[in-house]
Amino acid sequence: DPDILCFNITNANSRRIKENARKRFVPIRHELVELGFLDLVENARSQGKPFVFSVIQKVEDATRASNYFSSFWSDISRKEFGIHDKRLALYSFRHTFKKKLKAVGCKKDMRDLLMGHAETGTGSKYGEKRDAEPVPIRELSDYVNRIDWPFLKNIQA
């Protein structure tokens, strides 16, 4: 859907992913677009940088870049946002995201698509060798944007 911008999670640039289901599209919240996220992307692209965030500009391996960003986020969250609970890291956001998706009525299959979780069990593998099914990007975007994140109201460009 050309009207919905997404993060595209792939195994590009040597990124290691455990299974095919981890490849996914995650719609970008409208607040991020309004705050100028696309300007950050274009700025990085125009300078030939492989990543948007400067903390990971010199890393060739995308998995290592992800780890650097996680550390960067932890540092920012403690210094800038006053989050001092060591249990609250970038990874804990995934757990909160999944709970909030469920709270807004997001169906399990849609949550799995957003989280990169595969169905488990032998039965789930039957029929998987077919062509890829289209991603219901508009529905995913609706769920992502339905979640109330009060802190977003306090972020300024």
Image (cartoon, rainbow, N blue to C red):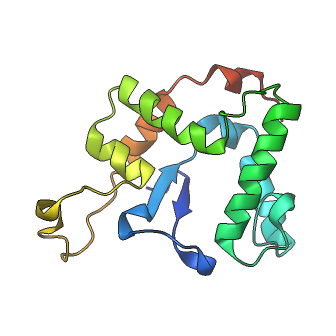
Residue 144's place in the image compared with 131, above or below, is: above
Q: Quadrant of residue 101?
A: top left
10 on left or right of 138: right
109 on left or right of 95: left
Residue 123's place in the image compared with 130, above or below, is: above
The N terminus, quarter of image = bottom left
In percent of the image, x 53 and y 62: which residue is there?
Answer: 8
Q: Position of residue 142 (x, y in %)?
A: 42, 36
Residue 3 visible, this orientation: no
Q: Quadrant of residue 99?
A: top left
**Residue extending furthest toward the front:** 86
Residue 157's place in the image compared with 70, above or below, is: above
Q: Position of residue 48 (x, y in %)?
A: 82, 76
Q: Quadrant of residue 76?
A: top right
In percent of the image, x 51 and y 69: which residue is there?
Answer: 10
107 on left or right of 129: right
